[in-house]
Image (spheres, coloured by chain):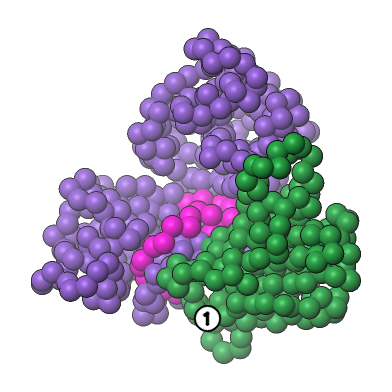
Amino acid sequence: MKVDVQALGTFNELAHEGAEQATRSLAQMTGIDGNVDVTRISLVDRADLGEELGDEQFVGVRFEFEGALSGETVLVFAEGATDEIVDALGHHADEAMARSSVEEIGNIMMSGFIDGWADHLDATIDHTPPDYIEREGSAILPEAPTEGGHQQLFVFRSEIEWVGEPIDFFIYMLPEYDPMTELMADHADPGADAIPIEKLEVFNRMTREGTETAAENVEMMTGIETAAEVTQISFVPIEDVPKQVGNDTVVGTVVEFTGLPSGYLLVLFDEASAMTVAEALMPMEPKGEGLTERHESAIEELGNIMTSGFVDGWANVLQQSVDHTPPRLVHDMGGAIIDPLAAQLGQEQRHAFIIDSRMQTDEIDFECEIHALPNGEQLREALDQLVVDRADQTEADVEQHF
Amino acid sequence: MKVYDGSQAEGASDAPAERVKVGIAEWEVTTDGAVLTTSGLGSCIGVALYDTATGTSGLVHVMLPTAEGRENGNPAKFSDTGTELLLEEMGEAGADLGSVEAKIAGGSDMLDFSEGGSGIGVRNVEVVRETLAAHDVPIVAEDVGGDHGRSLRLEAETGDLVVKSANEGSATL
């Protein structure tokens, strides 16, 4: 099964349009004004599904759907938002009303979402009545589809901002793998160069290996034991790339890597983590307040080591060298750091793959994100050259790491 | 994207101005003094327009210099078509284009890995300048270039553009 990049773009737009439709329905029926912030398609390891939801309490409305696409979809929001929703609908807040208000919103939005898909696919998609749930973290999401025994899953995720309220809605859609990939193959341009889906999965595993190596390097240098947490490859319109990073101030390094594929690699720490990890590298307590130059140079050194580890992981699998520029130290708003890099790629492509990894440790306050932005066409070529038994080799390597 | 005309805020004149986020490759126009914000400008540019006659204000967050040679893209993504689109929408919302002034910020040269030639930030600034000049819109204030990111807040009540950077505090244009 192959999927071309254009088909991924089409499906991203479909999901986005579905979320827009859901938001319009919401505004018409309730007067709640929403704005679809980001829609992304990710290929996620089944064990990592919904990790970004942390351990917060969520309320959700789930539906099963069947037809041109099959699977489950859920509207999710933070538990605390229920009161605002009840209020916006003009109801009195009691438990039964909270539940029926949420179901009402869920029904309105998700019918819009699924109808949006069906319209664009010119096909019928039926859905079940809503199922109201309250769960913690990733448990709010449906069980990952088990058909076909695939280790990696496609996840569509849209983030909708409630204008004027500090509340976000999320729509997750987990389609069954085989019908989804068949539909994508149907929408592929037969003349275009396509990526075999299995190889995208391999690329995810490569990234995991890269992150593991980077984490080992951190441990060797600082003695801080870290765990590589999430690795996913997402596909978004180029203008949505900066939204994947957010706008908090971060510290880290950026390199351009060359070879096949070329692109950019960012190692970013939030300011508190940067302080912690930099001080672990210093022989004595630094003088001065906040993040000093000595902190920054420690981060630069660490970024370099992590980048090498990450890139080596890729090079091993691709069996060719991947070079990179010396790291540039960055200390700025996250979005502003990645924006020029996305723009660079945006000169030639409308969508981008972004690879996100995170490592963290329970011991101390430490979290680090690694983002890679490969050139899309070159990523396709690199995957094309990857022979499958080498991919198996990667799998074996990953097992050894665990 | 929509035009905020105050229809939802009737009788609420004492309430704080509505804040409206403008994402990358998005625009907003307001006629009721809302606060338009956009964040994380690196090489991107925020073009803020203010009609001194009617108070109509608009903000667009553009990413790439020119739409030339591209098919069916989003016009708000590019410096040339994005600036033109915002002018057009300001006119639709009742602005008198003869009294519109521009303030621009962004176009930083940070993380420019390109070898030779101008970086995207520099070219974005050039194209925005050219486009505004072609429509006789004066740039009355600017904070462009450098090697840091910016976030913007356009206070449509006054036309003030507040530029914030991560390390260098904020300034009002």
Tell me how many marks there are.
Answer: 1
| Amino acid under disc 1 | Gly
A213 or A89: nearer the viewer: A89
A94 or A253: nearer the viewer: A94
Pointer 1 local density, CA inside 10 Å: few below 14, some 14–19, many at least 20:
some
**Chain letter belonging to callout 1:** B
In this picture, is A104 found above or below A178? Answer: above
Highlighted magenta segment, given as a residue range: A233-256
Residue furthest out toward the front: B14
The answer to which quarter of the image holds residue A161 is top right
The colour of chain A is purple
* Residue A93 percent location from the top left of the image: 54, 16
In this picture, is B95 found above or below B114? Answer: above
Q: Name the element at disc 1.
A: loop
Which residue is the site of mark 1?
A: B146
The answer to which quarter of the image holds residue B144 is bottom right
Task: Give the green chain's letter.
Answer: B
From the viewer's perspective, tell me whether residue A279 is left or right of residue A20.
left
* Residue A188 percent location from the top left of the image: 68, 49
* Residue A108 percent location from the top left of the image: 68, 24
Q: Residue at x 65, y 21 (%)?
A: A89
- Could you tell me if residue B39 is visible in this image? yes
